Amino acid sequence: MPETNKPLLIKRYASRRLYNTETSDYVTLEDIATFIREGREVQIVDLKSGDDLTRQYLLQIIAEHESKGENVLPVDVLTDLVRSYSTQAVSIVPQFLQASFEMLREGQSKAMGNLGKANPMSAMPGFEAMRAQQEAFFKAMTGGIMPGTSAPEKEADDLGDIKEQLAALQEKLSKMGK
């Protein structure tokens, strides 16, 4: 029986074929996506160099799903991600995304229980805090222009609120890293 508390090791051969070390057979990207959807962690390494290729293959799985019309990531989010690679925000983006997904996972069961209500996401614990943090993040990343709007907000009070929210987010993220 496989030990599921450690990542499933997938080795990539020089031929680019992917080998499942637990079942001793070759797997596809779709097989790897299925393992992940079932809750299994995976680690993909190059057999010859030992390089960890997990991130590269996970991005490839996402790209394939997006290209098949299984759109989860809105264009605005993808655009902001591309922008983040060319700004100083690249240092906080991973922590922000991780914290957002963590909050989403924690509140998922509660949201599923509220599906019959008008807006199930608003009943999720921490939803308003997450929404405010995301809004502050996007405003900071885009110079005050929120997706779907045309001009930055110029009010000093709003800028102060954004700075406070961003500082609070950074403080939470630094605590999470310890």
Image (cartoon, rainbow, N blue to C red):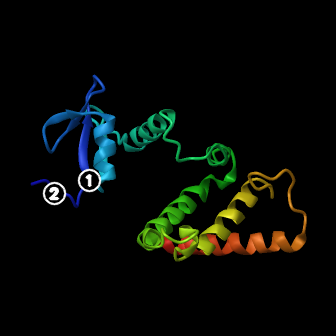
In the displayed image of the protein, which residue is found farthest to the top?
A: 15
At 34% across and 39% down in the image, what residue appears? 51
- Label 2 sits on a secondary structure element that is loop
At 73% across and 75% down in the image, what residue appears? 164
Q: Amino acid under label 2?
A: Glu
Give the spatial CA distance, label 1 vs label 2.
9 Å
Q: Amino acid under label 1?
A: Pro
Q: Nearer the viewer, residue 177 or 113?
A: 113
Which circle marks residue 7 in the picture? 1
Q: Nearer the viewer, residue 87 or 103?
A: 103
**Can residue 65 be seen here?**
yes
Badge 2: few (under 14), some or many (20 or more) residues near its Cα, within 10 Å?
few
Question: Eyeballing the image, is 141 above or below 178?
Answer: above
**Residue 127 placed where, x, y %?**
58, 72
**Residue 176 placed where, x, y %?**
49, 72
Which circle marks residue 3 in the picture? 2
User: In which image quadrant can residue 106 be found?
Assistant: bottom left
**Residue 68 placed where, x, y %?**
47, 33
User: In which image quadrant can residue 157 be found?
Assistant: bottom right
Question: Eyeballing the image, is 35 above or below 171?
Answer: above
